[in-house]
Amino acid sequence: MKITEDVRQHAAEQAISEEEALQRGMEEKSKEFVEAGAEVYAKAN
């Protein structure tokens, strides 16, 4: 799958394990979610 390939490539570029790459990515997305208001349903503009 494309996502799996992207994760593997990113991990290789960063010299980290695939699991570490996934963990870091989830942490980044979690921060973005909280900064955006932590709402599951965002209001349309």
Image (cartoon, rainbow, N blue to C red):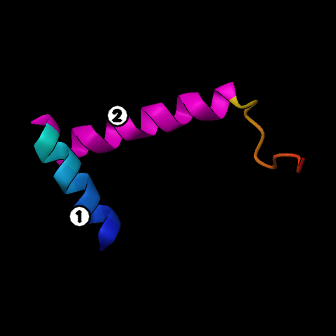
Magenta-tinted stretch: 14-35
Vertical relation: 34 (above or below) 8: above
Residue displayed at 66% across by 28% down: 34
Whole-percent x, y for residue 45 in the image:
90, 47
Residue displayed at 71% across by 31% down: 36
Queried whether the magenta region covers residue 21, the answer comes back as: yes
Circle 2 SS class: helix
Residue displayed at 22% across by 47% down: 10
- Name the mark nearer the viewer: 1 or 2: 1
Q: Which mark is residue 33?
A: none
Q: Is residue 43 left or right of residue 21?
A: right
Q: What is the crowding at mark 1: few (fewer than 14 residues within 10 Å), some, or many (at least 20)?
A: few
Residue kind at label 1, given as amino acid type: Glu
Whole-percent x, y for residue 19 in the image:
23, 44
Nearer-N-terminus badge (1/2):
1
Which residue position holds label 2?
A: 24
Of all residues shown, which one is farthest toward the bottom?
1
Which residue position holds label 1?
A: 5
Q: Is residue 24 visible?
A: yes
